[in-house]
Image (cartoon, rainbow, N blue to C red):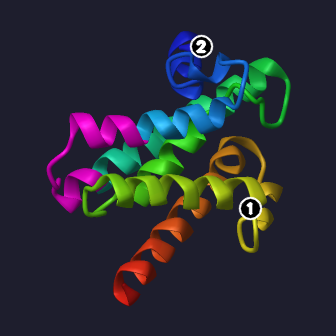
């Protein structure tokens, strides 16, 4: 069980990368979504993948953090994976759109404006995941506004 939790929480070891593992995990999600799943997917399938990532990530993050005896170990990057995937849901596939989605999500995840910062008070696996999930959904909302305006 611990092995599965570690694999999921660290996104198959990406979390052990020495420099910016969260950014690397986000970038890998964008590249995988772009190259491995290039055509528009059904929204239902995308929501299903997002929910699986989020629930499995919450479980794995909770166990990994307990094992590490820390609130939010840096090696946990499944939260960035789920958050970045949220931005990409139902997003028209193009290099520009996916690049913009990456940068908007990373900016929000790093700066943590309201209401993202408030989610850091939540404890356990949900707390680890919450800020990135809110950042991802907020980034997706901002992307939608961009599409309406331009």
- Residue situated furthest top in the rendering: 3
- SS at badge 2: helix
Residue in the picture at 62% in, 52% down: 106
Question: What separation in Å lies between label 2 and label 1 (alpha carbons)?
Answer: 26 Å
Q: Residue at x 52, y 51 (%)?
A: 83
Q: Quadrant of residue 134?
A: bottom right
Which quadrant, please, contains the C terminus? bottom left
Q: Residues within 10 Å of mark 2 (few under 14, many from 20)?
A: few
Relative to 11, residue 112 above or below:
below
| Residue at 16% across, 55% down | 40
Q: Is residue 6 depicted above or below 51 in this figure?
A: above
Query: Which numbered circle lies on residue 119?
Result: 1
Tell me if 9 is positioned left or right of 123 in this view.
left
Does residue 117 appear anywhere in the picture?
yes
Q: Quick one: which residue is furthest to the bottom in this view?
A: 149
In this view of the protein, which residue sits in the foreground, 31 or 73?
31
Visible in this render: residue 59? no
Figure quadrant of residue 28? top left
Judge whether residue 63 is colored magenta: no
Residues at circles 2 and 1 in contact by the CB criterion of under 8 Å: no
The residue where tag 2 is placed is: 2
What residue do we see at 75% from left, 74% from top? 114
Identify the magenta region: 30-46
Query: What secondary structure prevails in the magenta region?
Result: helix
| Magenta span includes 31 | yes
Q: Position of residue 12 (x, y in %)?
A: 50, 18
Element type where label 1 sits in the image: helix
Q: Nearer the viewer, mark 2 or mark 1?
A: 1
């Amino acid at each position: 069980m611990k092995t599965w939790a570690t694999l999921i929480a660290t996104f198959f070891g990406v979390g052990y990368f020495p420099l910016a593992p969260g950014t690397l995990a986000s970038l890998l999600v964008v590249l995988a979504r772009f190259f491995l799943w290039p055509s528009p997917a059904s929204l239902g399938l995308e929501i299903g993948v997002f929910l699986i990532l989020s629930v499995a990530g919450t479980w794995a993050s909770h166990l990994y953090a307990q094992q590490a005896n820390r609130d939010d170990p840096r090696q946990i990057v499944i939260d960035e994976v789920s958050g970045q995937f949220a931005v990409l849901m139902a997003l028209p596939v193009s290099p520009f759109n996916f690049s913009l989605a990456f940068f908007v999500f990373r900016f929000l995840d790093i700066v943590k404006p309201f209401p993202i910062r408030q989610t850091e008070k939540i404890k356990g696996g949900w707390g680890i995941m919450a800020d990135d999930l809110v950042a991802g959904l907020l980034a997706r909302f901002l992307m939608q506004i961009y599409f309406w305006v331009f």
